[in-house]
Amino acid sequence: MKRLSVIRLAIATMLIISLAGCKKVFDIRPQDQLDVSQAYQNVYDADAAVVGIYGKFMNMADRYVILNELRGDLLDVTNNADENLRQISTHTVAANNPYASPRPFYELIINCNDALKHFKIMVAEKRMTEDEFQQRYSDIGALRSFLYLQ
Amino acid sequence: MYLFKSYNLKKTAAVFMLLLVLKTGGAQVAKTGAAKVPITGTVTDAATGKGLVGIRVSVENFSAAITDENGKFSLNVPSLFTDVMISGDGYETRQLSLKGKNSITVSLLDEYHQSFQETVSLPLGKTLLRNIPAAVSKYDAAGEWTKPDETVDALLQGRVAGLNSIRRSGTPGVGANLFLRGYNSLFGTNKPLIVIDDMLYDVNDYGESIIANNYTNPLALINVQDIDNITVLKDASSIYGAKGANGAIIVTTARARQQATKIDVGIYTGVTAVPEKLPVMNAGSYRTYLGEILQSKGLSSSEIAAMPFMIDDQSHPEYYRYHNNTDWQKQIMKAGVNRNLFLKVTGGDNIATYALSVGYMKNEGIIKNTDLTRYNTRFNAEFNFSKKFTGSANLSFTYNEQNLKDQGISDKTAPVFVALTKAPFLTANEVNDKGVFSPNLEDADILGVSNPAVLIENMQAFNKYYRFFGSFKFNYAITKTLTASTLFGVVYDKVRENIFVPRKGVSNDTLNNAVADSRLGSQVKRLFSVYSDSRIEFNKVFNRLHSISSRLGLRYHHNNAEQDFALGFNSATDELISVQNGVGALRQIGGGIGEWNWMNTYFNLDYGFNNRFFVSLNAAMDGSSRFGKEAADGLAIGGVKYAVLPSLSAAWLASSEDFMKGSFIDLLKFRASYSFTGNDDIGNYTARQTYISQNLLGMQGLVRNSIPNPAIQWETSKKLNFGADIAVWNERVGVSLDVYRSKTDNMLIYEPMVSPTGIDNILTNGGSMVNMGFDASVNVRVVNTKNLKWDIGANAGKYKNEIKTPGTGFETEFAGATILTRYDNPANLFYGYKANGVFSTAAEAVSAGLRKKNADGSYSNFAAGDIRFADLNGDHIIDENDRQEIGDPNPDLFGGFTSRLAYKRFELNILFTFSQGNDVYNYVRRRLESVSGVENQLNSVVNRWRADGHVTDMPKATYGDPMGNSRFSDRWIEDGSYLRLRTASLQYNIPLKEGFVKYASVYVIGNNLLTFTKYMGYDPEFSANPGVFAQGIDTGLDPQFRSVTLGVRVGL
């Protein structure tokens, strides 16, 4: 009987060790990316978010030109242009035309929404001042409106 | 009554069975009582028929006897329904059921005989194969003295039914990709778990090599001469929880078998042979071809005639440069030399025994200037601190150095590909206008093709890697029945790679903002892991009938992997080869860090009734830092999800039953198992939302890294297995059969997302896949006389893989192939166009009226000399809707044949391996018959379509292939079936007088000696990467080659 209780104790100890320590053991943050729990800590993080969104926005320059200038006949296609560009130029866009996909715009809008949400949390938790908040919130808010209108 | 019940047992469920077993057991005890019953018997040698002296006959924990000079013994047994063990030096061990007889006659075969009576290593200890309810295969390596150059993965090829071992390429040490019973995952790993001396051996790749298509094989760090035996666990691997989905390969390394000091020395040297060359065009045919290509590019005939290689005037200053006939394949390949030295010392005393080994190996590849050098050390020891307290240590350190070259799809820098496509009228060395050759190597040619000789001589690609793999284990026997043990181990692994591609002799590469002439690179990959495995174990036999052993344990595995690389370009001169010499603005750096923890609480219960019924229950509860907190399955404790994975297996040894008393069958066993196992290869941080850097005009900002899936979890593999083992003819014939069905649920797939999410797809557990198949193996001792012993064996496996993910499926691109994954079909079907010959005349082409869409949206008609592709939907437009299944890379049957012939002091071992019915996509031939560029082509291209009315199957030469004649079609699909004489070794044991040298053997060993195949490439065996979608695709990796090795082993 005594032996049995030793076993029981051992099992219980093992279970306690294995389960109690677990939460920390299984919560490993990536080191080459920033975990969400470490983002938006202070105003500099908020700035990083704004810079990041603009950086990603720059990557959409081609779409901005193609979807506006080419459709508006301010540009024309050359002989080397592929079918997709020709479709944009002649306003006969097929469903599978990559330029027609709103996906990249939504990707940026999701980033904007994410930043706006966190800005609100930050100002509520006094991690940035009301002034700092208004500057950044209106910046991203304006960008988001612009994207929706594209 | 008893018989009736037993028959029922087979059909009833496992729990029910246990109850019945207990009931019948009780009845039997009452019948025979616990009194001592005397039995007598004779043990003879099966080869000579004479009685054997000194053979031990025993009943475990009860009684034992030794045979006299006539092989006779008498023994007291607890009942006539018990089992006796018979064992002796130099003979196989046998466990025999008395089945009511009080007199037995046993004739024993020698210890080399493969039977079901052998001891195998299981995850939790050693057991006799006959008593195991799971599907396991054993390979007794016993220090593979006849295969010094193999790696563990390639060693198992053709040895284990159901294990498809496909060697990656012919590079020394590169090993094989292993697939046990088909595929279990599409995007996770399919590698079986490798366990070496009770510790997980990590064989994953933490970051791509900077040497094109190089694979650093961690198993090349294991010397096969150190291996004792290997067990392949095909099902019921739940004990490894979320790492067991692909089965497990359990490796045990050298141990001291006796206390006397024993020294073994092995010395080997061998030569390799260059594979048969591919028939590429000679200078004359190529010049004509080149003329046609240039013409189709739009050059006028006078422009072409003015090209230096077209001018046949010997006084022309460049005549000698362009008028040669070089065999470029010969320039880059060379027969190599292998060397191998090995020293093993075993011994010890009653406190500690040890096995110490040191090895050196240098294997040259068939590509010039490639080799692998290995330095390995191992120290294994076992300690008896006290009667109750024992321990063991397994420490190994291996350092490998490899000289490599780029291979596979690397058009500018892979010597094999460049040699095949280089113009044969050029030469490796510079030549002046008098035809005098310089020792200097030529630069890249006017066609933009690199000089293969420069890639061999001046391009550098090193890989240096090492691994420390060590563990300590302590056992403490608390009582006779209860043991506690703990193992603690550390792995430290590092891979360092350097590359340098010179400017001179290699065609330039294009970066997004510059032209790269010389290329430099450096990479370090590091893995550090800590492993521990602690358990308590309970073993007891009740009433000599019920044996119970149970374990409860905890494994913990902490891992940290890091990859860092730097690439530089355009160093000032070709003498500056280290990465810091590259132009600063072009420097590229990158890498990754991964950290993860795995904790596995396991429970095991093995129950055996009277050595004839066996039930094994294994269960694991796994926690991992990789699992999402919102995983759908599993047990939630404290906000963490745990995978709960049980398995149950049962076996009935029918041959130990009374009703089998008079049967000719020596052993008949039925097995059944059902197991849940998991695959945790789901990415370290897939479940977490993270932010990554985003550049804005030199400033760094942060953006979301896609959308996480907090519900990501392990893949669950459910395996059902039925098996039977049969032995007849005094166990000289052994047959093992298994049928299985494994289903992977929660399989990772990329699920397409709607556009407002902003991303294309997300990794989810929405997939499902099924494998069904069978494994079979036969071993026969055909001849068994005193001087001649002949064993033959065969094994084969078949699997049928089917995707069960609903939906339309998806396509994957690899090496220009489209691979289709669709419901109810195998995971990796080749999906492409069907070619129906070449339009011979313009009229024929016009009447067919086929056309294709160009990039700019216009259409072009297929004309004479173009391929006639099948127009499936009849719209006369050849587009992606006309694709169909054109091949299946999965074999119908794969396996091997073995033969061991021992005559007096000679021994001949032969292994054939085969793969039957697998389709292969020959990417190399596609490039060499594309007739679309200035690269040299295969000789078959001479027969290309040239004029109206020409009937051929080779399309016309057109620059850039505007009609897509060389698109992915069944033109490139070939039958990859092969039968290969994989290894053959002849051994002679030299007769010696008692003295300093105790024994000595000489070996002649041949590898890949003969291959029977219809495949048109170098060799039908290759595996470009471990992924499901890369199988059966010949990307032009270094081919397999023949080798012959001479060796000698001396025992001191």
Image: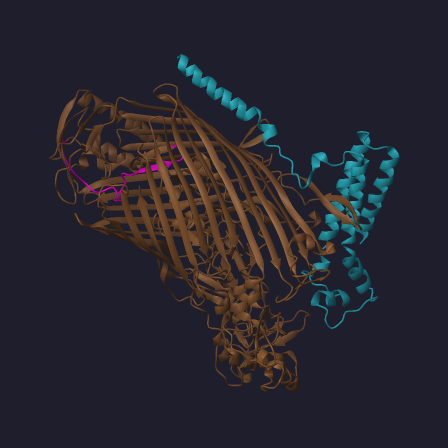
Q: Residue furthest right?
A: A131
Q: Position of residue B758 (x, y in %)?
A: 70, 49
Residue beneath the point at 54% across and 39% down: B492
Q: Position of residue B377 (x, y in %)?
A: 44, 41
Residue at position x 86%, y 36% in the image? A132
Farthest residue in the left direction?
B70
Chain B pictured colour? brown
Residue B323 forms part of the magenta stretch: no
Q: Is residue B233 visible?
A: no
Quadrant occupied by the C terminus of chain B: top left
Magenta stretch holds residue B120: yes
- Residue at the far top in the pictured view: A2
Of residues B245 and B252, the one nearer the viewer is: B252
- On screen, residue B549 above or below B892: above
Which range is magenta? Answer: B101-124
Chain represented in cyan = A
With B777 as the anchor, is B365 left or right in this view?
right
Q: Give the percent coordinates (x, y) of residue B448.
A: 63, 71
- Relative to A121, A94 lies left or right: left
Q: Is residue A81 left or right of residue B357?
A: right
Q: Quadrant of the N terminus of chain B?
A: top left
Percent x, y for residue B1040? 43, 60
